Image (cartoon, grey):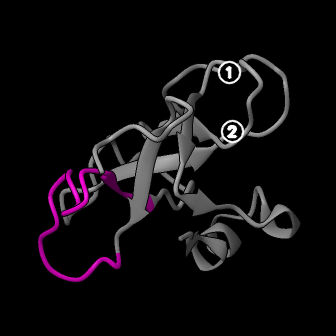
Amino acid sequence: MGIYDADGKIRLTLSNGSGWKGLYAPDGSWYVTVSPGTSFVGAYAPDGSLYITNATGSSTVGRIASDGSLRVTLSSENNGALRVSGITFSPAVTGNPIGLLLALTYTA
């Protein structure tokens, strides 16, 4: 399938955190882990996946969050975050790092 979807967004696959994953999933998407948001984590999780932070709203943000993770958005708005697909952030828990981790799901 490759890294890009039909709209040009980067496809993501949620890492389950067990064992070594690396950056690329078998289907060509990026493996990601939601950053806990409580302290600096850098770009890569221990399993080799990328740490991500959900950027919501239309306010301009930097591509890199203060904890070192990559800011991503599912929105079509150009807020500075990387536009992605393949995962779902539940709006009810956006901003709650634990809730985000639980709310990320695979999409078919």
The residue that appears at 41% across and 36% down in the rendered structure is 68
Q: Secondary structure at mark 2?
A: loop
Q: Nearer the viewer, residue 31 or 33?
A: 31
Q: How many marks?
A: 2
* Relative side of 31 to 5, left or right: left
Q: Range of the magenta residues? A: 16-33
Dot 1 or dot 2, earlier in sequence: 2
Say few, some or many: other residues with alpha carbon within 10 Å of mark 1 (under 14 / 14 to 19 / 20 or more): some
29 inside magenta stretch: yes
Please give the name of the residue rendered at 38% of the width and 57% of the height, measured from the top-left corner: 32
Q: Residues within 10 Å of mark 2 (few under 14, many from 20)?
A: many
57 with respect to 80 (left or right): right
Residue 61, disc: 1
The residue identified by callout 2 is 55
Most frequent secondary structure within the magenta stretch: loop
Compared with 64, 93 (above or below) is below
Horizontal and vertical percent position of residue 48: 18, 57
- Name the amino acid, label 2: Ala
**Which mark, residue 33?**
none
Q: Is residue 83 above or below residue 91?
A: above
Task: Please indicate whether residue 100 sits to the left or right of residue 19 in the image.
Answer: right
Q: Position of residue 73 (x, y in %)?
A: 65, 39
Q: Is residue 77 above or below residue 48?
A: above
Name which quarter of the figure residue 62 lies in: top right
Q: Residue at x 19, y 66 (%)?
A: 47
70 lies left or right of 59: left
